[in-house]
Amino acid sequence: VSNERASGELLLIGHTGQVGGALLKLLARQPLGFSIRALAHRAGVYWFREAVHPAEVKLDELLPGSAWLDRRGIDFLTLDAATARLAAVARAAVIVDCTASADIPRRYPKWLTAGIGVVTPNKIGFAGAQADFELLQRLALRHGAPLEHEGTVGAALPVLNTVADQLRAGAPLTTIEATLSGTLGYVLDQLQQGVRFSSAVERARDAGYTEPDPWVDLSGEDVARKLLILARVGGHALEPTALTRKPLAVPGLPAVDGLAPHFSDHDGPLQAAAERAARRGERLAYVARYMDGRALVGLESLPLDHPLVQAKGPDNVIVLSSEIYPDQPLVIRGPGAGVNATASAVHADLHRASLKLAARCPGVRSVAA
Ligand SMILES: NC(=O)c1ccc[n+]([C@@H]2O[C@H](COP(=O)([O-])OP(=O)(O)OC[C@H]3O[C@@H](n4cnc5c(N)ncnc54)[C@H](OP(=O)(O)O)[C@@H]3O)[C@@H](O)[C@H]2O)c1
């Protein structure tokens, strides 16, 4: 545990979730100069009257009436009350959104305007209208509030910051060709090894690769969001309506028994698609493409020597061209999903945020200072 005295305060939304829980463990080891001011989930916010070192947070004790909470001194607040208080008490603060909620990102503009940083692996706030994406960048700049979301594309792979660095050097992306879903990579890999589609989806969920709602992966929505984010960070205005999405599988109507739609409804057709590809000596991949303002995501059958089918399991392959890489594209490849990888991307984003806060507030120390 670092001895560094904390100087920035965090409000973490989603401490009960997979990524939020894993992030707390990383922060306990290396707090990056941050202490925990508040922890939030759907039921509300635990507000610590004195900010707590991350290593001292006892997740098992976060129950109303627990002796630890009583000793600590906490208030239960709504999210809006807690963020208003955060803006009032902290000189340097960051809200970490580890949810997959659409509700939370609507508040980012308000937080950035109050000078509060936003760090998140949640794609939703960056994949809506282009104007909303641009507004966030403008507000972050105008109010000196860090805004970091590397984990939204490729989990901990070095994608967005690499692309943003190229854009700053005057080289927008010219083409994107990629597999961007750890879940779909894993599921298609299993399918092509003879595993039933429905079992592969369950395995992906057990391994922590899927979105909280796996249909967001299977419908291609998650990949579509990532392609929008990647193209935008790469310098292109792109509206969701300009993107063509061909789902791998859609939920359809609830089953007659009233239960949620079954993954197994898609076992037969997808097994047939895998067999057709194998007969041609090809492999299936769920591909994201961007070129000349046109974006599309969908299932493709590709020759075995194609870079996008060189990866196995949850790996992503991201092939990027720009003026800096005109002949040989930049290829980024590796695990594009996973709870620990995503938490480490958020942790790295918090490090970048701490550097920006330290630059904004003289006297606020970051670990790197
Ligand atoms: N897993 C991966 O490989 C991966 C990769 C890249 C990005 N991500 C992103 O990481 C984020 C978290 O994923 P996860 O797998 O950790 O999800 P998760 O396990 O389902 O956790 C979600 C957390 O968010 C909280 N939450 C949900 N809606 C909320 C709301 N409206 N207000 C306050 N809290 C709310 C939940 O709290 P309660 O349920 O206790 O109320 C829970 O703590 C998502 O945006 C996902 O897209 C994940």
Image (spheres, rainbow, N blue to C red):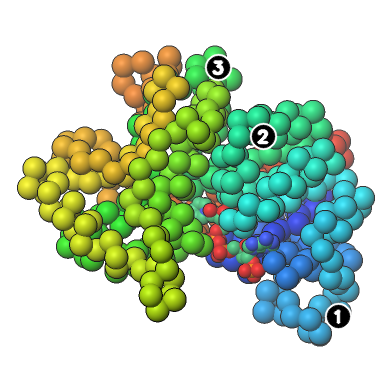
Instruction: From the top left corner, tell me how far across and down residue 66 is, in percent.
Output: 78, 84
What crowding class fits label 1: few (fewer than 14 Cα within 10 Å), some (14-19), or many (20 or more)? few
Residue at (56% x, 46% y) in the render: 123
- The foreground one among 85 and 367 is 85
Placement of 75 over or under 215, stated as above or below: below
Q: Which residue is mark 3?
A: 169
Cα separation between marks 3 and 2: 24 Å
- The foreground one among 170 and 80 is 80
**Sequence-wise, which precedes: disc 2 or disc 1?**
1
Q: Amino acid at mark 1?
A: Asp
Q: In this rendering, would 61 be left or right of 361?
A: left
Placement of 100 over or under 255, stated as above or below: above
Q: In this rendering, would 368 be left or right of 217?
A: right
Residue 335, which numbered label?
A: none
Q: Amino acid at mark 3?
A: Ala
Contact between marks 2 and 1 (CB within 8 A): the answer is no
Q: Which residue is mark 1?
A: 70
Instruction: From the top left corner, tell me how far across and down residue 42 is, in percent.
Output: 69, 67
- The foreground one among 237 and 194 is 237
Cα separation between marks 2 and 1: 41 Å
Q: Which residue is mark 2?
A: 132
Instruction: From the top left corner, tell me how far across and down residue 217 is, in percent.
Output: 42, 53
Count of numbered circles on the image: 3
Placement of 246 over or under 67, stated as above or below: above
Q: Secondary structure at mark 1?
A: helix
Q: Secondary structure at mark 3?
A: loop
